[in-house]
Amino acid sequence: MALSPTSALASLSDLQSQPLSIIRLSESISSTTNPTTTNENPNARTSDISTSALDLPTPTSLAADLTHYRDLFSKLRFSYLEQVTKEKFLRAIVGDPPLIVEHSENVELEKQLAEIKSVLKMQKAGVQRLVEELERKGRELAGRYEGVGLRVEMLGRLPGEIEGLEVRVGELRRGNEGLVESIGGGSGMGVERIREVVGEREREREEVERRVKALQREIPGKGRELDRLESELKDLERERERAVQGAKEAVKCREDGGVVGDELEMKGRWLNGCEEGLRGLLGVEA
């Protein structure tokens, strides 16, 4: 039997109301290994670190716990090695007869220690890879969990939106039916004729859209041509400015009694003619 949208949304909301926590999920595992401690106090811990992190664990609190436990186990390991070394030394001294270790035995023990260290190093590398994989999986699951939460929130808004859209569709259908009846009754056209007219208008619209797209494809070429003409116009502007400057100098020389060559005047007339021609083609006023 298929679930209704309301019941499915209610089930998802119930699941979302229970926050996920790795520490809380691990309580079921720790309860099987130490049921007495779990029954007495589920949040009991062997260290003096704060137990409030169990209720609201955060990345900061988890990092603090990790640092605390690392220091604790480092001190414990040092104390254990110290006590074991002292115990072996005292037993070797007070033993009857005293325990005497040969150099060959030390060499053999060093070989065994090197082998054990290499195995331990490999195991540490494997644990590091496992930790990295778990971190990657954790980040992936966290992202998926957040995505599910966003989708659930979106699904919660969908029923109201769907209902509103259904009402709107009903109104549009009723309005469309009334419009078709009014058009057909007022103009004497039947429904089939109205559909033909609508089809013709659709074809005309498609033709206009095709022409618009064709013109849009021509826009880059026209733009490049306009840029070229503007560049030429700027060159002519610079030439005109030089010609005007030359003309001013010629007028000044003429006023001073000097003589200006006909070549400069002809060049100025030619540049003025080119400028007027380009302005007329581009529709630019002076």
Image (cartoon, rainbow, N blue to C red):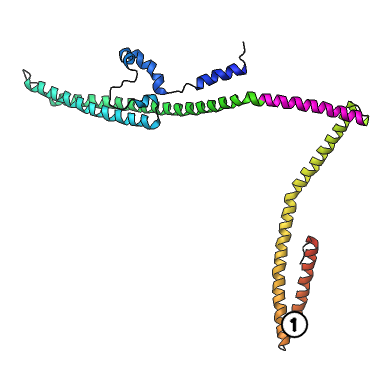
Read off the magenta span: 162-186
Instruction: Check disc 1 and report the residue beneath it.
Output: 261
Q: Quadrant of residue 58?
A: top left
Q: Is residue 99 above or below residue 275?
A: above
Residue 157 horizontal side relative to residue 252, left or right: left
Q: Is residue 258 visible?
A: no
Q: Is residue 103 above or below residue 255?
A: above
Residue 181 horizontal side relative to residue 167, left or right: right
Q: Looking at this view, name the residue that lies furthest to the top.
A: 1
Q: Quadrant of the C terminus?
A: bottom right
Q: Quadrant of residue 91?
A: top left
The answer to if 177 sits in the magenta stretch is yes
Local crowd at mark 1 within 10 Å, few (<14), some, or many (≥20)?
few
Q: Horizontal and vertical percent for residue 261?
A: 75, 82
Q: Quadrant of the N terminus?
A: top right
Q: Is residue 264 above or below residue 284?
A: below
Q: Looking at this view, name the residue that lies furthest to the right.
A: 188
Residue at 79% over, 41% down: 210
Nearer to me, 238 or 112: 238
Residue at 51% over, 26% down: 144
Residue at 31% over, 13% down: 36
Q: Horizontal and vertical percent for residue 106?
A: 16, 26
Q: How many marks are shown on the rendered structure?
A: 1
Nearer to me, 211 or 149: 149
Residue at 91% over, 28% down: 185
> Which residue type carries mark 1?
Gly
Q: Horizontal and vertical percent for residue 212?
A: 78, 44
